[in-house]
Amino acid sequence: MPFVPHTEDEIKQMLQAIGVSSIDDLFDEIPAHLRIDGLPAVPEGMTEMEVTRLMQKRAAKDANAVCFIGAGAYEHHIPAAVWQITTRGEYYTAYTPYQAEASQGTLQLIYEFQSMMTALTAMDVSNASMYDGASALAEAVLMAVRGNRKSKSRKILIPTSVHPTYRKTTHAIVAGQNIELVEVGYDAGSGTTPLKAFEACAGDDVTAVVIQQPNFFGNLEDVDAITDWAHAKDILVIAVANPLVLAVLQPPGEWGETGVDIACGDGQPLGAPLSSGGPYYGYLCGTQALVRQLPGRIVGRTVDLDGRPGFTLTLQAREQHIRRSKATSNICTNQGLVVTASTIHMAILGPEGLEKTAAACHANTVALVSQLCEIKGVQRAHSAAYFHEAVLQLDAPASEVLDALLARGILGGFNLADDYPELGNAILVCATEMRSADEIKDYVTALDDIMSSVTKPANYAGAV
Amino acid sequence: MLIFEHSTPGRRGAPQAPRQGADLSDLPAAQLRKHRAALPEVSEMQAVRHYTRLSQKNFSIDTHFYPLGSCTMKYNPRACNSLAMLPGFLARHPLTPDSQSQGFLACMYELQEMLCAATGMAGFSLAPMAGAQGEFAGVAMIGAYHKARGDSARKEILVPDAAHGTNPATATMCGFTVREIPTLDNGDVDIEALQTAVGPQTAGLMLTNPSTLGVFERQIETIAKIIHQAGGLLYYDGANLNAILGKIRPGDMGFDVIHSNLHKTFSTPHGGGGPGSGAVGVSERLKPFLPLPLVSKKAEHYSWVSEKDLPQSIGRLSAFMGNAGVLLRAYIYMRLLGREGMKRVAEFATLNANYMAAEAKRRGFELAIPERRSSHEFIITLKKEARDLHVTAMDFAKRLLDLGYHAPTTYFPLLVPECLLIEPTETEAKEVLDGFMDALQQIREEAKTSPELVTGAPHTLPVKRLDDVRAARQLDLAWKKT
């Protein structure tokens, strides 16, 4: 019996103590006609050796091509120590730190995490994590609606240059709460969302605006102007930002004159492997004024009976287990273990390590994009400055080109046809610090070959 | 000491950063950071030592018995971790085309199928990233179902007063109003009150079965009938699925939608608060509304199901595929257990709980619902001890920590005064359960002879009881460079 330690003798003793004759008797309060005898449709159990063989075979099937896709998940170097420490049983198998005295390790680590995130974002406060960047944005929107008492409209402006799935997720999560999400179009030339586009959608009363930096296309938005404009109209500003990039870019807490009100994003670039999309974590930071509107767990530093410093979950009156239907959110379980990894990752890399990593991503992507754009039939779609992703337009069907690259072991980029049909044959490319000069050269050579062999269909108008 | 207090300017973990310098002169200067983020500057070894030492201040399943009611703190097999972290799985970008993802997709498809088989539901989505998000998906599907039928008057979700806080919080998040249904002293839902509460405004009822009181809801079929006749749907909170795995299935009880906490029943680690997974299962009529993505299989080829295939879906709940690594761990656990192992889960979780309840009674502790069979958990009420000895459930909980046991869930469910909700799980051996009961007995003796031992506990941990009031009043939520 896997993971059940009982001997026959012990079972007998225990049944006797209970006063029943069989384990089955313990289920006698369940209506008999509803009871089943096992689960025949579930396969038979396997030994650890057999499962190992199966999983190794399956993992090998997904033999990984060289990755030039970002689009919200980025391949970065993670120090070996990070996950070795994170998967120590004391972190891996601990519960939520409700019993503070028996959880000082996790609690102090979360306090350090909150400190690191406020340092990176230049915001006042951080919570202990949300599920991922997309759901963090949804919670940020709800937080803004609660926090902006001057606004009645429950209207949120979201540029279409924000990650498409973040927008979909936000829509799915806030749909039931009578909130209007207004999409703001981006400028086709620059690939950013100019202030005048926000102005055109604003009307009389807006609750909050969302700005992603760098935006989904990798381009840098004019965050100062948008932030100042919004604040002048009593509109709250929600920043969505890649936290690794914040090691070198102006942090949301310093955008414009006063900084944004809420900053969120996905913590994946800080120590979480790509891992098919998760587990990652969402970070969510705010100004001091909004601290009681923050959803999720928050750790505070305090003292014990002897006056020694210690850590505990605090402001729990915001949360579902106390406040029930009046809670700020229904979130309970968060992404604690990934936060553990991320905290250790940031400590090992340090500020300079993160800066160099971010800068190397930028340099590699610039090298990639400039070389690819020398190929006939490949050009950059936008004119704005970009960080470590860029949109390329191809004079050939994007899906065919990507398939041909994949056949050569290269994941050449993310096809934008479904989300941005107006861009025609466009792909989003990314080269993190993990891509070597040789890998970039191989990509350039391969695309050059493919572009010269893929014939351009007559009057091809892009995927619509 | 904080990691920040170990920091020395200029110290760095050199081999971890790329070789290149940090030249960003091609970017607009106004967009660049003006001053370096105040992150710690430590050597790799300092970081390793600091976080290893911090870990030693934690209780965990790997180090302590953790009978936390409603949380299912069972052994997390190590194979699940090492196999989910095979390089092929870790390096897979979530937007990799299906053709290069058949290994991962096969696991996800089979996980969906096994969850359907184990719960009696017709379809499963693995998208939700925790129990509360599973609840959100479930209640949003209930809303979408009524809306699709043009039944827009159904604005109310019923929740028993014994429910987890996430239930009412979720209903509110989905735009419903919440009406609480009382629970009888014997742990069953008050059927008369339920009958009065239902009507054309009822969207559904959220129920945990066995309930948070640790007893099976015996009138589940009557409840299902009342809800369905009123035009509502029945939601199963899977927090306590461990109690019935392989013995009875929510689908057979009449539930229309369920979420399963894979980090409870299917033993993925709690990780100090997460990540979890709240996979959602539905009956046939709710399948069109499942959250995306799903995995489908046609002629031995696995592929993603998207908005085009499922236009009525409630949508997406994360940027990619939920907590994929957690799902892999649950999949591996289920393959290790197989059909025989799964049935043993409920049997031995129930045996352990009933044995502990019998022992508690024998040793003179009062059970909250003594006349009922316990499910996988049970409740001791310490109201007598609180009255006569002036020690509370909290004092017992803290003293247990000194004696090497993680405390049970205290003060939940809210209906029972001075309660300890105890869930031993199937993976604990008899001698551990006996040791825990000895400890409870010892604490009661201490409360008579030297009460300060109990009321001042814990004495042996890194800190004594913490000043929660100060934590909330003098907020200190982040270290700041001074």
Image (cartoon, coloured by chain):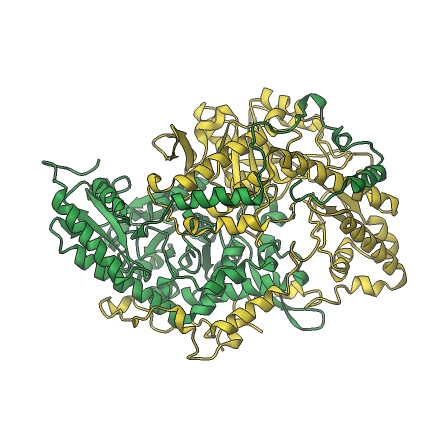
Chain colours: A green, B yellow
Q: Nearer the viewer, residue B62 or A383?
A: B62
As displayed, is residue B192 above or below residue A257? above
**Which residue extends farthest right?**
B449
Indicate the position of residue B65 as horizontal and vertical percent values: 71, 53
Residue at image location 52% in from the left, 76% down from the top: B6
Q: Is residue A124 visible?
A: no
Indicate the position of residue A71 as horizontal and vertical percent values: 32, 50
Q: Nearer the viewer, residue B239 or A396?
A: A396
As displayed, is residue A253 above or below residue A195? below
**Which residue extends farthest left?**
A458
Indicate the position of residue A183 as horizontal and vertical percent values: 31, 44
Residue at image location 15% in from the left, 37% down from the top: A461
As displayed, is residue B377 above or below residue B390? above
Q: Quadrant of residue A352?
A: bottom left
Residue at image location 55% in from the left, 64% down from the top: A109
- Left or right placement of residue B470 versus residue A295 in this view: right
